[in-house]
């Protein structure tokens, strides 16, 4: 049942047979997603369920994947196959606040480089890194559909638009 | 940010700014679900004819005539049929669907139910990009309201027709805006595009007949049923019917989402009058990407004084394309080669890796851009890049490859000065963002 995380996606290979456990409320939520699809097409629920696993465990880890393989009656590799394709799935742990800065054209020409520098120097990390206290991770991402209100970032699932350095300071101070 | 209609009554933007316009009671009070009632009293062929008459073309970027797409569905097929809403809006420069779903989710639902009735489908999915989680929540609430009111579920509004709708989340992949990749993703696989034919209308989701349309396409359907196809078409031009939402961003005073009649004249007036003109008054217009990042970039000379009309034909005649209507405006402070590098990095990141021309080609292009920007530019680089583009364009599995080639081809053609300057003067990257 063991599956290796592709090394190119993580710092080290983590292999585990451990199967994650979830509360009955979460299991019900998962079943609600599975019920959206025809009975013989439950694999369709894989991406929504990976989202749930990530919400509950913070990232897509081996035990979470092992659980989904069992839950949806898939091979462990099937789950990894899908999980490693999508950029929103964190294949390594991220900070409590995941700052995703849009770097695509409209944001880029409307001041994203200054915002990125401001955030990174304030936190003392580079894009792709997590602060030592595990509070913040900064990731550069592609267009988030907020071009009219550029520059922008998303923290977790929250959109923060029309950013200025002062606005960023306030937002980061509000992150507990 | 502005959200308003110019040159026409707001249709798609009808409920923007209406208090609680996203709720079922207000939606109904403002004429909502009247078109569904009307559609349920029509025959399927009549509805398809209205949609054909309307000259509605897919609003997701490809611009395929919606009525024709619908007519490809084998309605007598014994298989289940599916209606899928493509809300994977990830084209750089496009942000219109976001506001439609936020302020008018019931219009999406109504359009999808009418499509379901027309094509004999009982199930629909709204595939929304994962980053738009708040919109999925809004759609879930709206779907719940509609179910409770008997608008979704068994025997809709007392008819014999049953239809149910579900939300589905993406998880960050531009390629899933391509309809066959979206279907792979909806089935729980990597977002790889599929070979066409068979087209999704014949073999789509779960190898069953499936219609995939953009959010704005679906919200146009109730308008067409209400007004009649011909009347709706006449809001625009004969070949480009109706109104269209434009997302405008970059160096303009009033970026935002604007609803314009198709054939709006002209692009210069739109940028300089309706959108308030250049962000900094002393800076001149340099470049515009009119339809989202996947179209040809235009220089100021192709726009100023040229009377470019804003419709499918007008933009093609002007040397670009309508795409999703995601217009990005750049002033003279912008280095167009930096712009092109930025977009090429986007396509490299978003290439799904399925076919070699796109996977390898975008990677090589970024490598060349990086080499030039670190001071290693060579005179033959323009030709080298055009050669690589030539090996991607038309040779990749899906249109993402073409989309990666077009910005480079047009940038080199329309801005030869920028490219030359880049090759000779470039010593270090202007880009302060570490490449991650």
Image (cartoon, coloured by chain):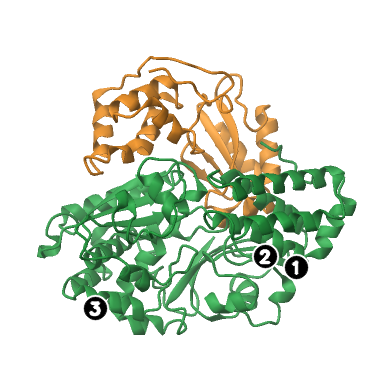
Chain colours: A orange, B green
Q: Chain of mark 1?
A: B
| Labelled disc at residue B297 | 2
Residue A81 falls left or right of residue B312: left
Residue drawn at 66 percent across, 51 percent down: B344
| On screen, residue B253 above or below B341 | below
| On screen, residue B328 above or below B123 | below
Q: Earlier in the sequence, mark 2 or mark 1?
A: 2
Q: Chain of mark 2?
A: B
Calculate the distance from the C-alpha at mark 1 to the C-alpha at mark 3. 46 Å
Residue drawn at 67 percent across, 27 percent down: A125
The percent coordinates of residue B393 (x first, y second) are: 62, 59
The residue carrying pointer 3 sits among few (fewer than 14), some (14 to 19) or many (20 or more) residues within 10 Å by Cα, namely few
| Labelled disc at residue B304 | none
Q: Give the secondary structure at mark 3.
A: helix
Q: Earlier in the sequence, mark 1 or mark 3?
A: 3
Residue drawn at 47 percent across, 46 percent down: B192
User: Are the two marked residues, 2 and 1, in contact with CB atoms closer than 8 angstroms?
Assistant: yes
Residue B367 falls left or right of residue B88: right
Q: Are marks 1 and 3 on the same chain?
A: yes
The residue carrying pointer 2 sits among few (fewer than 14), some (14 to 19) or many (20 or more) residues within 10 Å by Cα, namely many
On the rendered image, what quadrant is the C terminus of chain B found in?
Answer: top right
User: Which residue does the numbered mark 3 point to in the structure image?
Assistant: B46
User: Which residue does the numbered mark 1 point to in the structure image?
Assistant: B414
User: Are the two marked residues, 3 and 2, in contact with CB atoms closer than 8 angstroms?
Assistant: no
On the rendered image, what quadrant is the N terminus of chain B found in?
Answer: bottom right
Q: Chain of mark 3?
A: B
Residue B249 falls left or right of residue B156: right
Q: Residue furthest right?
A: B424
Kindly indicate the quadrant of the structure image that contains residue B349: top right
């Amino acid at each position: 049942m063991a599956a290796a995380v592709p090394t190119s996606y993580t710092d080290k290979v983590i292999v585990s047979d451990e199967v994650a456990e979830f509360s009955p409320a979460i299991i019900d939520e998962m079943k609600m997603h599975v019920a959206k699809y025809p009975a013989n097409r439950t694999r369709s629920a894989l991406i929504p369920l990976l989202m749930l696993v990530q919400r509950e465990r913070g990232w897509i880890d081996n035990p979470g994947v092992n659980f989904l393989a069992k839950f949806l009656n898939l091979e462990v590799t099937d789950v990894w196959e899908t999980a490693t394709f999508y950029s929103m799935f964190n294949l390594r742990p991220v900070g409590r606040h995941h700052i995703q800065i849009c770097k695509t054209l409209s944001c880029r020409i409307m001041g994203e480089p200054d915002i990125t520098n401001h955030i990174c120097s304030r936190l003392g990390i580079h894009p792709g890194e997590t602060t030592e206290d595990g509070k913040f991770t900064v990731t550069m991402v592609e267009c988030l559909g907020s071009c009219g209100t550029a520059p922008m970032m998303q923290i977790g699932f929250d959109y923060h638009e029309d950013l200025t350095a002062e606005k960023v300071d306030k937002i980061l101070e509000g992150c507990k | 940010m502005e959200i308003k209609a110019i040159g026409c009554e707001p249709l798609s933007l009808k409920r923007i700014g209406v208090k609680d316009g996203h709720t079922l009671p207000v939606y109904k009070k403002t004429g909502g679900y009247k078109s569904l009632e009307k559609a349920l009293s029509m025959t399927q062929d009549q509805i398809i004819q209205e949609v054909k008459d309307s000259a509605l073309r897919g609003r997701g970027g490809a611009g395929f005539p919606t009525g024709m797409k619908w007519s490809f569905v084998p309605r007598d097929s014994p298989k289940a049929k599916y209606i899928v809403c493509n809300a994977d809006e990830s084209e750089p420069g496009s942000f219109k669907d976001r506001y439609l779903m936020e302020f008018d989710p019931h219009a999406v639902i109504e359009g999808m139910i009418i499509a379901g009735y027309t094509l004999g489908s009982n199930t629909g999915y709204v595939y929304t990009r994962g980053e738009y989680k708040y919109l999925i929540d809004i759609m879930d609430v709206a779907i719940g309201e509609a179910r409770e009111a008997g608008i979704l579920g068994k025997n809709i509004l007392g008819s014999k027709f049953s239809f149910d709708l579900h939300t589905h989340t993406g998880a960050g992949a531009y390629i899933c805006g391509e309809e066959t990749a979206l279907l792979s993703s909806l089935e729980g696989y990597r977002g790889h595009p599929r070979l066409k034919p068979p087209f999704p209308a014949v073999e789509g989701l779960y190898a069953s007949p499936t219609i995939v349309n953009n959010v704005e396409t679906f919200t146009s359907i109730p308008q067409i049923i209400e007004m009649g196809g011909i009347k709706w078409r006449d809001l625009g031009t004969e070949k480009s019917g109706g109104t269209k939402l434009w997302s405008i961003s970059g160096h303009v005073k009033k970026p935002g989402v604007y609803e314009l009649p198709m054939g709006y004249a002209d692009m210069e007036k739109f940028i300089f009058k309706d959108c308030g003109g250049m962000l900094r008054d002393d800076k001149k217009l340099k470049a515009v990407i009119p339809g989202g990042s996947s179209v040809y970039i235009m220089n100021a000379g192709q726009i100023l004084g040229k009377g470019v009309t804003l419709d499918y034909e007008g933009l093609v005649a002007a040397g670009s394309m309508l795409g999703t209507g995601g217009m990005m405006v750049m002033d003279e402070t912008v280095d167009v080669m930096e712009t092109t590098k930025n977009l090429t990095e986007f396509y490299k990141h978003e290439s799904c890796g399925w076919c070699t021309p796109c996977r390898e080609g975008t990677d090589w292009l970024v490598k060349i851009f990086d080499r030039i920007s670190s001071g290693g530019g060579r005179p033959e680089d323009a030709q080298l890049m055009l050669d690589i583009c030539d090996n991607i364009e038309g040779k990749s599995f899906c249109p993402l490859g073409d989309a990666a080639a077009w910005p480079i081809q047009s940038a080199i053609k329309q801005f030869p000065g920028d490219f030359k300057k880049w090759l000779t003067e470039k010593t270090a990257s202007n880009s302060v963002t570490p490449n991650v």
